[in-house]
Structures are given as structure tokens and as C-alpha cells.
Image (cartoon, rainbow, N blue to C red):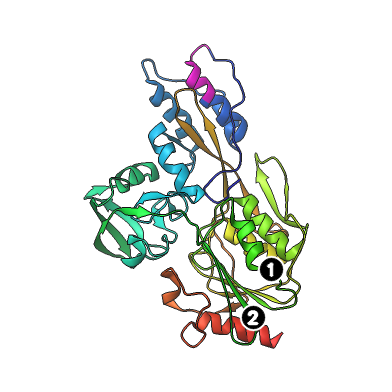
Amino acid sequence: MVCGGVLLACAGAPVQPRPDDDPVVAQARQALETQHPAGGRLAAVAFPAGTSRRGRIDVLLAALGDPSTRLLTPEAWAAFLPEVSGGPTVGVGLRELLDLDIGHDGRLVVVTTVPGGPAARAGLSPGDVLVRVDEHPVSELGEAMARLRGPEGAEVRLTLARGGQEQTVTLRREALPADASHVRAGGLAGGALHLALDGFFTDTPVAVAHALEGVGERPVVLDLRNNPGGAVEAALAVAGLFLGEREVARAVGRLDTPVLMSSGPAVVRGRVVVLVNRGTASAAELLAAALHDVGGARLVGEPTAGKALAHVPAKLDDGSVLLISSGRLLRMDGGEILGRGLTPDLAVAWPPSVHPPLSVPGQPGSDVQLAAALESLRAR
């Protein structure tokens, strides 16, 4: 299960073709009707005569009015999976839905960048709007990703809008290793543990548990800056290491459960401060909200991205996959994350924070957000 632009669960119940559908279109209609919150409006959708299979599915998607629900070709799905699961990829360091996503205004925006990748080294920042790729205007995420992906060593030109001004950067695609080092930890002066998570993948809970071995009563600075999210189950398991088994979030839409629970036994007994910034998104926002709302942790840094959509993939018989926005996640009190993000208890601006990777353990003398987090621990 992944939040804020990735996966919740696999779909694909058998369906009976409608008289006006071929079997693949029937599958698509059934999946959208049953798993999208607005799926009920599709029952009356009819197709113009002579419309192709892809055209018919596009008609269904247009009727939903939701650009986050879309069809991935078999090739796009094959490229998408390693990006969102932390596997090795080739690219510029802008993973689909994690680092590049559809913004609140419908434009394509940078959420964060792969630490140390070409986009990170070039200084791309959260909120940058992707306007063109190799001089081709891009307005849809699938189209943008098809142009961003390509062979290792090849260059690609990105035109970005920032603060009303356009700028163009040339990036070279490179092999990006699996996210084996996405959990980083080190001791800080005074005894606090600095624990940074760069994403949530299948192996994240085990890696975090290892980093927390023997932490006991030590205070923890949990660094979620530039964490774009990932697997919700992984985020809930990490939450359990801090909270034990607790109700931590609510869900609305066509999701299986209305309440999300953290899982596993708690191992952290000391004070916790969570660092966040504009690159904190999706499942990272879920974890930050859970630790704040349920565990009493303080949030330090800058407002977060405001991503809380949950998606489910529905694989069709022709190999294509519908990525369906099946719902959204809320804070325990019902507060929205989508479009609002989280507001830190202690607001501390530091522009360099959005350029990963940040060092762990960090240097409070130069990292003012980390310094503020440590001061917050001492003041409690």
C-alpha cells in the first residue's frame, strides 16, 4: 500500500463485458465504477461510434474529471514499478508520483528529487513547475515521464517555471541505484539520535528498527525532510516503532478501512521531534501527522507538500494498468492533508533544506532546522 500518488492494493475482479464494450473496456469501466469515489457517474457513459479502445477508456477517464486517475501503457507500468518500490532505475532523479506529480492547480510540479541524482545536483526544488521537456510542452504526468525516461548517458532538456520565471537545465540520464541507503542514522552531541528517512519501501521498517536498536529513553530527531512518501504499510510499521499499535489516521473514499492503524511494538520511549519541509509528502506526511497528533511529537521546519491521495492499480488484460485515485487520508481529527499539508509547531525557514541529500548526523551549526529541533528537545 502506498499513499499520495502510489499504490494501495491490487485490483482486478472479474467483470462481464457490456454490449457496447470490448472486454478490456469493460474491465476498465468496472474498475473505475467500483474503486473511484466518482465511479457511479460512469454507468450512463456512452461511446461515440468508431471510438478506439484507448479512446473509450479516455472517455471514461474524462467523465471522472480526475487527472490523477489515468491509464499507464505496459511499458510505462514496467518503468513505474521500480521507481515507486525503491528499485534501480535509469533517469534524471525525478520518479513518477514521488518526485514529480500533478500539483493542486493541475500543473506538473517537483515534490523533491532523488538524493544525489542529476535533478538534485542541478538544484531543482519543490514547487518548480515542469513546462517543457526537450522543447515539447508537457501537461500530463504520463507524457512527461515518457519524455524524461530514456537511455543512460543521454541528455534531456527541462524547462521549469519558478517564481514566474522560466529556466532551462540540461540533465544527463544516469543509472540510479536501489534505495539501499534511504534510512540513515547517527548520534548527535548531547545524546540525541538523528534518524533520516528518504522514502518508504518494503525494507524500510526493518532498517528503521535496526537503527533504533537500544534507543530506549534517548531523544530522537526524525528527519522527514525531502521524503516524498511511498508504501503506507511501511510508514505505519515505522509509526508503530514510536507509538505501538494505535489508530493514527482516517480514510475517505473507496478505501478498505476507514481507520489506519500503526503496527508492531513501540521501541522509542524518549522525546521525539520531527523535521519537515516542502519536500515532505504523502506517506511521510502521514507519519509526521501520526507522531504529532497521537504521540505528541513536535514538528519543526516548514509546511509540508499536502499530498494525501491513495491510489490502487487495476491491471487490464491488454497489459495496461489503470492507476485509480481511490480516496484520500485525513488526520485523526478529520483535518485535511491534501492541499493543506502540515503546519510545523515551530516554523524555521532554511532554503538549503530542499536540496538532498542532507548529512546524517547533521551539523546544528549550519543546519538551523536541526539546531531548532535540538533546542526544542531541550526545552521540553
**Would you say 65 lies left or right of 291 here?**
left
Q: Nearer the viewer, residue 191 or 3?
A: 191
Residue that appears at 41% across and 61% down: 113
x and y percentages locating residue 203 in the rendered image: 59, 53
x and y percentages locating residue 1 in the rendered image: 61, 45
Above or below for 5 versus 110:
above
Which residue matches tag 1? 213
Q: Check disc 1 and report its element: helix, strand or loop.
A: loop
CA–CA distance between discs 1 and 2? 14 Å
**Would you say 247 lies left or right of 90 here?**
right
**Is residue 163 something that shows in the picture?**
no
Three-letter amino acid code at the position of disc 2: Ala
Above or below for 88 versus 242:
above
Task: Based on the picture, tell me whether residue 21 belongs to the magenta stretch.
Answer: yes
x and y percentages locating residue 335 in the rendered image: 66, 59
Which residue matches tag 2? 192
Which contiguous range is marked in magenta? 19-27
Q: Quadrant of residue 177?
A: bottom left
Mark positioned earlier in the residue sequence (1 or 2):
2
Residues tagged 1 and 2 counted as in contact (Cβ below 8 A): no
x and y percentages locating residue 43 in the rendered image: 57, 24
Task: Based on the picture, tell me whether residue 278 belongs to the magenta stretch.
Answer: no
Q: Check disc 2 and report its element: helix, strand or loop.
A: loop
Q: Nearer the viewer, residue 32 or 80?
A: 80
Q: Nearer the viewer, residue 223 or 213?
A: 213
